[in-house]
């Protein structure tokens, strides 16, 4: 059972890293400064960052050790979320990007 759970966790992390890479590309195409760095070819961890506005930075970290959403304003921590809460916040960011990208396409 534990080996199966470990395998599922690794697959989850890899899937999350691939989605972060795709979100980075979409954000860059929408004019945001974004980056996603992975460690190794197996995509077991990633550091995702995006500047939403001047002095407004979001950093999302994923690894075998955990998942963290960190929102900064002027280098000060505004909010720090972990686990499912961090993923939910990432989904909200993706929804905003998706919505704004759809508006750009219709204009």
Image (spheres, rainbow, N blue to C red):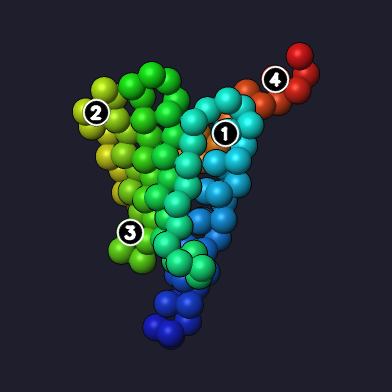
Looking at this view, name the residue that lies furthest to the right: 106
Name the N-terminal-most of marks 2 and 4.
2
Name the N-terminal-most of marks 4 and 3.
3
The residue indicated by pointer 2 is 75
Q: Residues within 10 Å of mark 4 (few under 14, many from 20)?
A: few
Q: Quadrant of residue 54?
A: top left
**Residues under labels 1 and 3: Cα distance?**
24 Å
Name the N-terminal-most of marks 1 and 4.
1
Residue 39, how many percent across, how many down?
42, 62
The residue indicated by pointer 1 is 27
Residue 56, how many percent across, how many down?
36, 24
Residue at screen point 63% across, 31% down: 29
Name the N-terminal-most of marks 1 and 3.
1
Residue at screen point 45% across, 67% down: 40
Q: Is residue 22 above or below residue 10?
A: above
Q: Quadrant of residue 104?
A: top right
Residue at screen point 57% across, 56% down: 18
Eye-nearest disc, 2 or 4: 2
The residue indicated by pointer 3 is 66
Q: Is residue 22 above or below residue 31?
A: below
Which quarter of the figure is the N terminus placed in? Answer: bottom left
**Residues under labels 2 and 4: Cα distance?**
31 Å
Q: Residues within 10 Å of mark 3 (few under 14, many from 20)?
A: few
Report helix, strand or loop for mark 2: loop
The residue indicated by pointer 4 is 103
Mark number for residue 40? none
**Residues under labels 4 and 3: Cα distance?**
34 Å
């Amino acid at each position: 059972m534990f080996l199966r759970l470990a395998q599922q966790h690794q697959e989850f992390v890899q899937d999350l890293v691939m989605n972060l890479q795709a979100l980075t590309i979409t954000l860059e195409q929408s004019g945001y400064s974004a980056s996603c760095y992975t460690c190794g070819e197996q995509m077991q961890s990633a550091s995702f960052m995006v500047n939403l506005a001047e002095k407004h930075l979001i950093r999302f970290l994923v690894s075998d050790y955990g998942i963290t959403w960190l929102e900064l304003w002027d280098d000060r921590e505004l909010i720090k979320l972990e686990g499912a809460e961090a993923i939910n916040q990432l989904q909200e960011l993706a929804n905003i990007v998706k919505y704004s990208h759809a508006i750009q396409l219709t204009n």
